Image: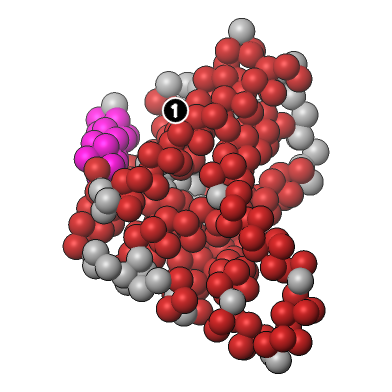
Amino acid sequence: METLYAIALGIIQGLTEFLPVSSSGHLVLFQNVFGLTEPELLLDIWLHVGTLMAIFVVFYKEILSILTTLMNFPRLYRQHKGLASMFRENQDVRLAGLIIIGSIPTGILGVLFHEIADQIFSSVQLVGIMLLITGTFLWLTRWTNVHGRPLNQMKVSDSLGVGLAQGLAILPGISRSGATISAALFLGIDREVAGRFSFLLCIPAITGALILSLKSPAAYSTIPAAGIFAGSVAAGLTGFFALKVLLKLVRKGRLYYFSPYCWLLGAMALGWYYWG
């Protein structure tokens, strides 16, 4: 029974972590409406590891290219005669730099609100409102430019803006992927670049959150290791397919497809809060 429970949570995690419908918002609603408990910390950590592995698999070429370039950083630095020139002319260095810069506002908001997030942001009312907001900015992506700016025209301010959007996704009901991709599109970034940058940017964020979680004394589980492993695999496999589907929709400019679901779920959450 514990293994089936872990697999079910893994599937939910894999779907809601990547599709722009807010995994944290779903968790709050499930806890309050259906009386479900939050996953044990160790299981939750491994579910996030599973979704992180999905990102590594989908973007392995980009990640490998960045790592290879950074390993040759001293040689490239001498070749380009400075960091500014490297940032302008080398796509991998530029992408790595933008990811680091974009992680700054995310990290600041994460550290500031990590300890109090559960106490402040666990309201069904807040989740309902945030889901309505998520659905709205997903819908507004319909009117973003078809041909946006490529990676070599992304600016530091673009990266900071997307990173800020990612930091705000600590609010349950605000989708991390929806917020970051929408922000990039609103800033005039190319659709494919927006999707790719969004998920590469989340690698430091998820990794940082996992490190903070590991510091908790509650990092244990009553679920057997086999169950935790099964849940992690389920999260990874489900996340892989969810990520591929989302990237395809982003390239086609169909991110707004998820708006009605967010609006409906948000309205149901508010209805349950006020009249349930």
Residue 211 in percent (x, y) is at 74, 49
Residue 223 in percent (x, y) is at 71, 18
Q: Which span is picked out in magenta?
A: 258-275
Residue 221 in percent (x, y) is at 74, 24
The residue where tag 1 is placed is 30
Disc 1 residue type (three-letter): Phe
Q: Quadrant of residue 65?
A: bottom right
* Residue located 39% across and 47% down the image: 247
Q: Is residue 105 visible?
A: no
* Residue located 33% across and 51% down the image: 250
**Which class describes the residues within 10 Å of circle 1: few (<14), some (14-19), or many (20+)?**
some
Tell me, yes or no, whether the highlighted magenta stretch contains residue 191. no
Q: Quadrant of the N terminus?
A: top right
Residue that sits furthest to the top in the current view:
1
Q: Is residue 143 above or below residue 275?
A: below
Residue 24 left/right relative to 128? right
Prevailing SS of the magenta stretch: helix
Q: Quadrant of residue 100?
A: bottom right
Q: Quadrant of the C terminus?
A: top left
Tell me, yes or no, whether the highlighted magenta stretch contains residue 259. yes
What is the secondary structure assignment of the residue under circle 1? helix
Q: Is residue 256 above or below residue 223?
A: below
Residue 47 left/right relative to 215? left
